[in-house]
Image: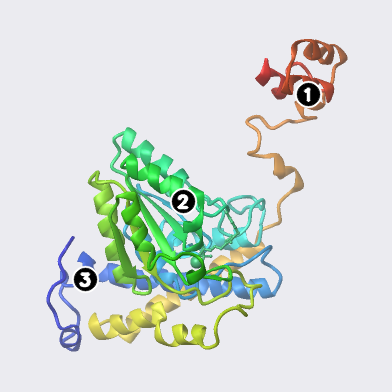
């Protein structure tokens, strides 16, 4: 960890740019600005998705990370290219950092035929092992045991790679979370578990989720280090995650990182947040917006100019506009494409188990038991996957 240089940000800013090596957390000047780019891209892309949702061009739900951009971006920024990330619906920012593109995201939300899941899955449920982000599964907490397995494989192969898995406050109440974190801890897997403490799980406030004072306390029960940070401060988020990532890479096992943030939108766009106390959302928007806070720091503490900020904003708008144009021009999926990628050898004519040659069915029912008999009784051929598996 690079140590923070003792500085007066304001004084330096007045004199112009800081010297390289004096930015916090060992970041370079370019990286400090890059963090702003990823947060701005996340927000603008989501705002574009809202517009498309209202035009009924988004198929299914739309899940926002408004107010949580710093937590997703800062944590993912602590990973290397070869590391693997397991995002959730509110981690668009982390996927972008890991190489997902706005065109993919837009096509995916619009269920286009050339989207990463070819229109068969919606929103952010897609992954790419080459770029190091996994397709999420919906049951809360289930990605923790999955990532325990992924990172155990890194350890067994002697690879210096790290995994990061996000869970919400709601997900910490599941059995899968407990089993996964405990197993990973005991196996000393190179895994970072980021708990995004954003005040709600759908409509359930944190006080009804747990009696623990803070989620970071749960680390004690698993015998692992736990650290907490302000999830709306992108650099603090980066710093705390980087420490956990470095520990994992050094072979020191699992860490739990709790990021304190706030979900300013409903669970999804359809949720009117009637369960939220009056004024709460406005207060977070006014006083604790991660992008507004970072813009102030960029200007006052790090000496970035208005032109530099505008340069990023213009680039983001240009990229999102271009991506929208491309995604909108994509065609919907072809019905027959539904079979591609489902079977190792896609059936060209009828599926095997509908070819009920009489002799095969008799032979099969004579030999088969259990599922085999069930398959034969339902017209399965002797070489059907069902009967062969049970021979
Ligand atoms: C085991 C399980 N129970 C319920 C659901 C339905 N569900 C999906 S998201 C969600 C809320 C998740 O809250 P949290 O974990 O705090 O994440 P956040 O949405 O706040 O990011 C619920 C209840 C689910 N997907 N899986
Ligand atoms: Mg939550």
| Residue at the outermost left position | 6
Residue 14 seen in the figure: yes
Estimate the x, y position of residue 147 in percent, counting from the top left: 43, 46
- Between disc 3 and disc 2, whose residue precedes? 3
Residue 79 seen in the figure: no
- Between disc 1 and disc 3, whose residue precedes? 3
Reading the image, the residue beneath label 1 is 374
Indicate whether 277 appears above or below 128: below
Reading the image, the residue beneath label 3 is 24
Q: In which quadrant of the rendered image does the C terminus lie?
A: top right
Reading the image, the residue beneath label 2 is 177
Question: Depth-wise, is mark 1 or mark 2 nearer the camera?
Answer: 2
Quarter-wise, where is residue 196 in the image? bottom left
The dot on residue 134 is: none
Q: State the residue in front, 391 or 18.
A: 391
**Mark 1 vs mark 3, CA separation in Å:** 65 Å
**Mark 1 vs mark 2, CA separation in Å:** 37 Å
Question: Depth-wise, is mark 1 or mark 3 nearer the camera?
Answer: 1
- Between disc 1 and disc 2, whose residue precedes? 2
Estimate the x, y position of residue 316 in percent, counting from the top left: 46, 73
Asked if the residue at tag 2 contacts the one at tag 1, i.e. Cβ–Cβ closer than 8 Å, the answer is no
**Mark 3 vs mark 2, CA separation in Å:** 33 Å
Cβ(mark 1) to ligand 1 < 8 Å? no
């Amino acid at each position: 960890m690079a140590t923070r240089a003792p500085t007066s940000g304001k004084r330096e800013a007045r004199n112009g740019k800081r010297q390289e090596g004096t930015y916090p957390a060992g970041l370079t000047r370019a990286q400090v600005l890059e963090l702003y780019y990823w947060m701005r891209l996340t927000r603008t892309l989501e705002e574009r998705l809202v517009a498309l949702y209202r035009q009924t061009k988004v198929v299914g739900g739309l899940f926002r990370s408004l107010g949580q951009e710093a937590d997703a971006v800062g944590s993912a920024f602590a990973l290397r290219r070869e590391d693997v990330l397991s995002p959730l619906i509110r981690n668009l920012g982390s996927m972008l950092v890991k190489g997902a593109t706005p065109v993919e995201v837009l096509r995916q939300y619009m269920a286009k035929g050339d989207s990463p899941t070819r229109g068969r899955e919606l929103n952010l449920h897609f992954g790419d092992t080459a770029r190091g982000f996994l397709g999420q599964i919906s049951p809360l907490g289930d990605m923790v045991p999955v990532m325990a397995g992924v990172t155990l494989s890194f350890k067994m192969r002697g690879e210096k790679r790290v995994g990061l898995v996000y869970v919400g406050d709601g997900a910490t109440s599941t059995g899968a979370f407990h089993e996964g974190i405990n197993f990973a801890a005991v196996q000393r897997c190179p895994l970072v578990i980021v708990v995004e403490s954003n005040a709600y799980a759908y409509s359930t406030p944190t006080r009804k989720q747990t009696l623990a004072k803070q989620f970071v306390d749960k680390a004690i029960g698993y015998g692992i280090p736990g650290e907490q940070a302000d999830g709306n401060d992108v650099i603090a988020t980066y710093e705390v995650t980087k420490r956990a990532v470095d520990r994992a890479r050094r072979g020191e096992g699992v860490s739990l990182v709790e990021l304190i943030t706030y979900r300013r939108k409903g669970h999804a766009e359809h949720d009117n947040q009637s369960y939220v106390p009056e004024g709460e959302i406005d207060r977070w928007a006014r006083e604790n917006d991660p992008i507004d806070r970072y813009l102030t720091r960029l200007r006052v503490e790090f000496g970035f100019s208005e032109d530099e900020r505008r340069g990023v904003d213009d680039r983001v708008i240009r990229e999102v506009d271009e991506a929208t144009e491309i995604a909108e021009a994509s065609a919907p999926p072809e019905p027959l494409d539904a079979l591609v990628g489902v079977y190792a050898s896609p059936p060209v004519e009828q599926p095997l188990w509908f070819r009920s040659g009489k002799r095969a069915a008799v032979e099969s029912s004579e030999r088969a038991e259990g599922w085999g008999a069930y398959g034969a009784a339902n017209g399965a051929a002797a070489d059907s996957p069902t009967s062969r598996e049970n021979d």
